[in-house]
Image (cartoon, rainbow, N blue to C red):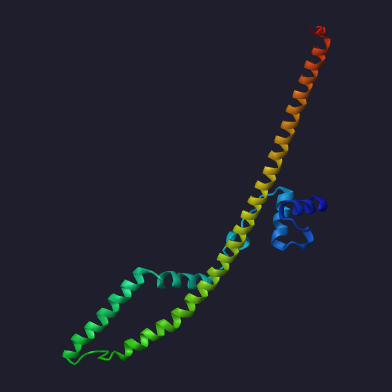
Amino acid sequence: MTNFREQLAQDLLGCDYATLSAQKKSVIDLVADQRPTGVGPLIAVDERDGWQKLADNVAKVGGSWSFIITFGVILTVWVSSNLVLTVFGRAFDPYPFIFLNLLLSMVAALQAPIIMMSQNRQAAIDRAAAEHDYVVNLRAELEIMLLHDKLDAMRDRDVLTRLDDVNSRLAAIDARLAQLPVQPSR
């Protein structure tokens, strides 16, 4: 079986099986064993814990238009209510809105690393998906090359069969011509 893998590596990739990367070896193994590629390991199973799922949900909500619009409405209500209440001397956060600035800073300080954690995890999933796509595409390309080789071999066999058929017909015609009487020339 190793010789078959070595032959595939030489025919399809033009190099020795031993010199291939682990990824390319896995593709040659899949082609040799004629097994389906399957699903990448990080794509198949959701192994996130509760905190990671929470971080992903925070990133999903924090990066949405509904969050931006809701947050804008809350800020507008906060500022306008404090401006109105300032006239009556009852503002809970008068201009320059120091408490609002504190809350905004705290939201930004907490939300930014949570979103970054989610993005890092998504980047790892995207890398695994890209690697899986590369393996699938490389395998498809190699399988197509094998199919071309098989079609060429079939075409060559067909051409040889036709040539043999033409040769046997020509031989039959030669045999018939040889049996005909020769006419004297004038």
- State which quadrant residue 98 falls in: bottom left
In the image, 46: left or right of 110?
Answer: right
In this view, the residue in front, 16 or 67, is 16
- Residue 106 sits above or below residue 139 on the image: below
Residue 125 placed where, x, y %?
56, 66
In the image, 10: left or right of 42?
Answer: right
In this view, the residue in front, 80 or 152, is 152
Residue 50 placed where, x, y %?
53, 71
In the image, 69: left or right of 2?
Answer: left
Identity of the residue drawn at 48% across and 77% down: 114
Residue 122 placed where, x, y %?
53, 68
- State which quadrant residue 131 falls in: bottom right
Identity of the residue drawn at 23% across and 86% down: 82
Residue 137 placed where, x, y %?
61, 54
Identity of the residue drawn at 30% across and 76% down: 72
- State which quadrant residue 22 falls in: bottom right
- Residue 184 sits above or below residue 94 on the image: above
Q: Among all residues in the image, which is located at the extreme front?
A: 186
Task: Count up the numbered dots.
Answer: 0
The C terminus: image quadrant: top right
Identity of the residue drawn at 70% across and 59% down: 24
- Residue 65 sits above or below residue 106 on the image: above
